[in-house]
Amino acid sequence: MSQQDRRTIASYPTYSEAERAVDYLSDQEFPVERVAIIGHDLQLVEQVVGRVGHGRAALSGAASGALPGALIGWIFGLLSWLDPVLSSLLLALYGMIFGAVIGALLGLLLYSVQRGRRDFASVSTMQPSRYEVVADAEVADQAAKLLNRLGSAAAGTTATEK
């Protein structure tokens, strides 16, 4: 089905409210496979989680280097014909240590190259400002009527109230 074959039946400020509306439709035996939740007006939110210094850069690099190092060591250990279990575990340990050291050095190097331009760590997310519940045009009226029955318990405005 194309986007033109769908109609907005309700709009909500939070995802949990839109999810609750679709859950209500499901509880009423409505064919929810004909419904979608669409987020509108996306904005990038970058939450700063802390400062980054030489220590944190080294620790982050060590953590990101340890796992690949252990994996490579373990694989090399499995290729050993003599006692593969012991050699794979030992090489995995050596690989983890080697990977952590190399990762820490690379983390420090990359931090130094930035010369203080980005001395913080952050997590980026995309957040819509509102969520619309849409349904296929053939069943949109039925869905809107069901959501009207939900009434004020679902904190949103249905398309018929607009």
Image (cartoon, grey):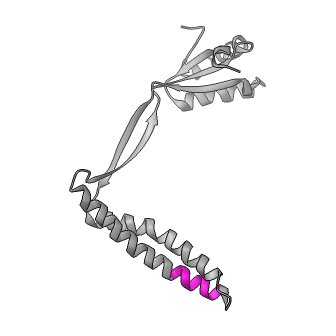
Query: 159 or 149: which is nearer to us?
Result: 159
Q: Quadrant of the C terminus?
A: top right
Residue at screen point 68% across, 88% down: 81
Percent x, y for residue 56? 31, 64
Q: Height in image: 80 above or below 126?
A: below
Residue at screen point 62% across, 29% down: 20
Determine if residue 56 is in view. no
Q: Height in image: 104 above or below 131?
A: below
Query: Which image quarter: residue 104?
Result: bottom left
Query: Which is the main secondary structure of the residues drawn in magenta?
Result: helix
Query: 117 or 16: which is nearer to us?
Result: 117
Residue at screen point 68% across, 24% down: 35
Looking at the image, residue 96 sits to the left or right of residue 109; the answer is right
Looking at the image, residue 97 sits to the left or right of residue 72; the answer is left
| Callout count | 0
Determine if residue 69 is in view. yes
Percent x, y for residue 153? 59, 22
Residue at screen point 51% across, 69% down: 68
Q: Quadrant of the N terminus?
A: top right
Percent x, y for residue 73? 55, 78
Q: Which residues are magenta?
A: 85-93
Residue 90 forms part of the magenta stretch: yes
Query: Which image quarter: residue 45?
Result: top left
Quick one: which residue is furthest to the left in this view? 115
Q: Height in image: 119 above or below 144?
A: below
Q: Height in image: 86 above or below 159?
A: below
Residue 87 forms part of the magenta stretch: yes
Query: Which image quarter: residue 22?
Result: top right
